[in-house]
Amino acid sequence: MVRRCCKEKLFHTMYQVIVLVILSIAVSVLVNALRPEGLIWMQVTQPPGTFDIESITPDEAWVLLSDNRIRFVDARSALDFYQGHLPGAVNVPHKDMDKAFMQLKSIVQSGSTLVTYCDDPECTLGLELARLLKNSGIDTVKVLTAGWAGWYEAGYPVEESMEGGAG
Amino acid sequence: MSMDRTVYGMLSLCFRMILGVVFLYAGIVKIIDPAGFALAISNYRILPDILVNAVAIVLPFLEVFAGAALIAGIVIPGSSLVVTGLLLIFFCALFISLVRGLDISCGCFSTSYRADPVTWLYLVRDGTLIFMGGFVFFFDQGMFSLEKYLCSRKT
């Protein structure tokens, strides 16, 4: 008798769980389809969450850099930056974001677009920094998804120095 | 015996409200910024890339519905099981990333990567919530339950 009761309770509970899960899936499908910033369900080519930040390739970045229309922002550590970085880059590791914000803002006000980057497409620090800048009110920001490795492999020039740190 | 039941019922009601509010809040924050939440999930490097966005889309709604059900007192066994199950999954994810030494944000109550870097305290917090979820699952007496109220009106 007791066993039957437990079995019934378990069945009842599992039924409720299934209802909750199905309801969540149904509503989330609907909401995601209706909202303009909805995500693509299955996505492997770009890092997740990149849709709100425009991505840029090394070739595009090189053309814009030649026209002085962009400024690179290196989201990696100071040590990585010291060992090599993209031309004219400003080093802004996570912890230095607040200190560097005014400097970045003045770069944007002078008409340049910020292009953040990290090591390679696997590293999301560049994207995270770009999102943070965008949330802080800097709209002209893009991300070099290919990162340092992509730039280096494409054969474009790099710099080695301590200059350009955030402060 | 009935005194025990009342105490258990009151405690369970408290835990239901706490869990309900926590899940409702956590879910809404993630619904507002799905891309940020996708990034937070992806930083854990546990799920295959192809599943990251799907989880980022569905999970917040599951949190909201389970949280709302707990507060309202509807499908309490099911919603408390969902909440406890999710908390166990979060516990494992937090534990794995702490052991691996990943310097990432929790993605628990904020989708910003700087808001809440994962520490061992998060495991304690998660463990406490798991205890509450288990307590509600096993000992809830249906106090202030909308479901119970509606059923009693029918009969």
Image (cartoon, coloured by chain):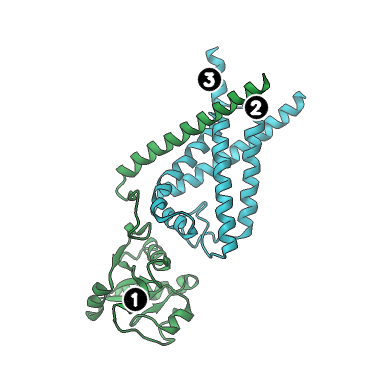
**What's the colour of chain A in the image?**
green
Query: What separation in Å lies between label 1 and label 3 (alpha carbons)?
Result: 62 Å
Tell whether label 3 touches label 1 (CB within 8 Å).
no
Who's the residue at 41% across and 50% down the image?
A: B51
User: Against A27, is B1 above or below?
Assistant: above
| Residue B143 position within the rendered picture, expressed as x and y whole percent measured from the top left | 63, 27
Mark 3 crowdedness (10 Å alpha carbons): few <14, some 14-19, many ≥20: few
Q: Nearer the viewer, mark 3 or mark 2?
A: 2
| Residue A38 position within the rendered picture, expressed as x and y whole percent measured from the top left | 33, 48
Q: Label 1 amino acid?
A: Phe
B94 with respect to A53 (left or right) = right
Who's the residue at 32% across and 72% down the image?
A: A114
**What residue does disc 2 label?**
B141
User: Against B37, is A92 above or below?
Assistant: below
- Relative depth, front residue between B25 and B56: B56
> Please, which residue is most extreme toward the top here?
B155
Who's the residue at 50% across and 47% down the image?
A: B26
Task: Tell me the cyan chain.
Answer: B
Mark 1 crowdedness (10 Å alpha carbons): few <14, some 14-19, many ≥20: many
Disc 3 is placed on an element classified as: helix
Who's the residue at 34% across and 84% down the image?
A: A158
**What residue does disc 1 label?**
A72
Q: Label 3 amino acid?
A: Leu
Residue B13 visible: no
Disc 1 is placed on an element classified as: strand
**What residue does disc 3 label?**
B150
Q: What subunit carries mark 2?
A: B
| Residue A128 position within the rendered picture, expressed as x and y whole percent measured from the top left | 41, 64
Q: Do callouts 3 and 2 point to residues on the same chain?
A: yes
